[in-house]
Amino acid sequence: MGKVFGLIAREATLQTIKKSPDTAETLCLAYIVTGDDDAKNLIEGQKCITIDGCPAMCAAKNAELAGGIVEEKVRVVDAFRRHRGANAGTATELTDEGWQITDEIVEEVITKIKELSKEEE
Amino acid sequence: MSENQTKIGVVSCSGEDCLGGTISRLATRKMLEKIYPEETVTICLPLYLAGGEEERSFANDYPTISVDGCSKYCAKRATEKYSGKVSAEINVADIIGKETAEQGPLSGRDITSEHLQMVEQVVEQIQVKFDEVLNKPNSKKKNDGDGGCCCGGNCGC
């Protein structure tokens, strides 16, 4: 909620799902946090890729706590290493640079999804 | 607003599941950035589990308004499960309609003026609750920090 990194993580997730509707789906992080059985049932034992905005790694930790098998932990801050000094926007709105970083993360995640899908075949 | 401010926590659902979640997130951001920037603090909901004692004491430290996008009430329930009772709650679906709120999540790339109008409607309701909570006696904590985050800074940690 407080930083641009979180918004990039969120947008990257939404774009990834939009581009991979047959191979990926998302689950509302807040729903996982509630600890509801219904939420747990949706993630337990499932292969997951988490996208975290900050080093607290909330998505990864919560997915693991709910029984998800986290195959890849993507950190938005790592993507910024390729864009030192970038003005990505704010926690409310991304700039063009912010969207560029988002799109790079989406490509990275889609590649990983394809790898995981192949492993399952 | 009185001179002797009390900060109020506004906790939004993360909103990856539906339009109502996106609207709740944007409305919360507007409270932080434009409406009551000096008086509003927030916390990332998943920090209740992934963070430490400091994060879990959020709703004990601040009077808190939960802003949920749908009837699952994740923000309210998670806050009350891990942190403390909320002082007020908002369900975006009650404001923009259940059917609308339960549409798919919205990317920033697809926001229209209609969506922004929904954000305004929700902001108005948060403001009403905000003022009600501020006027309640025994608000939980006065805080001298001037940022938007629960730590008193503006980091959103």
Image: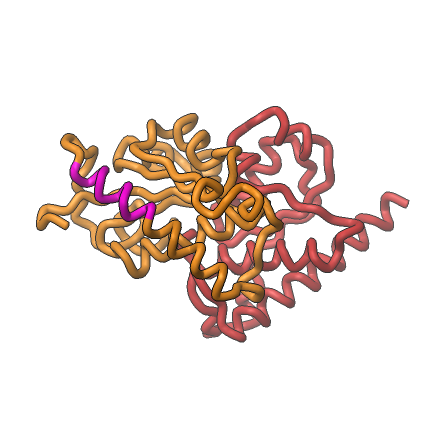
Chain colours: A red, B orange
Name above or below for residue B147 compared with residue B109.
above
Report the residue at 51% width, 30% height from top: A34
Indicate left or right for B82 with B134 as reference: right
Q: Residue B117 location, x and y as percent?
A: 43, 59
Report the residue at 33% width, 39% height from top: B65
Indicate left or right for B107 with B23 as reference: right
Q: Nearer the viewer, residue A99 or B12?
A: B12
Q: Residue B33 location, x and y as percent?
A: 32, 59
Residue B124 falls within the magenta-colored stretch: no
Indicate left or right for A94 with B137 as reference: right
Furthest residue toward right = A121
- The boundaries of the magenta stretch are B125-135
Q: Nearer the viewer, residue B86 or A57?
A: B86
Report the residue at 33% width, 31% height from top: B86
Q: Residue A5 location, x and y as percent?
A: 49, 59
Q: Nearer the viewer, residue B117 or B88?
A: B117
Q: Residue B128 location, x and y as percent?
A: 27, 45
The image quarter in which residue A20 lies: bottom right
Name above or below for residue A65 compared with residue B153.
above
Question: Main SS type for the magenta part?
Answer: helix
Furthest residue toward left = B3
Say how many tags the image has: 0
Name above or below for residue A113 compared with residue B48.
below
Report the residue at 61% width, 24% height from top: A37
Residue B130 falls within the magenta-colored stretch: yes
Indicate left or right for B14 with B38 as reference: right
The image quarter in which residue B67 lies: top left
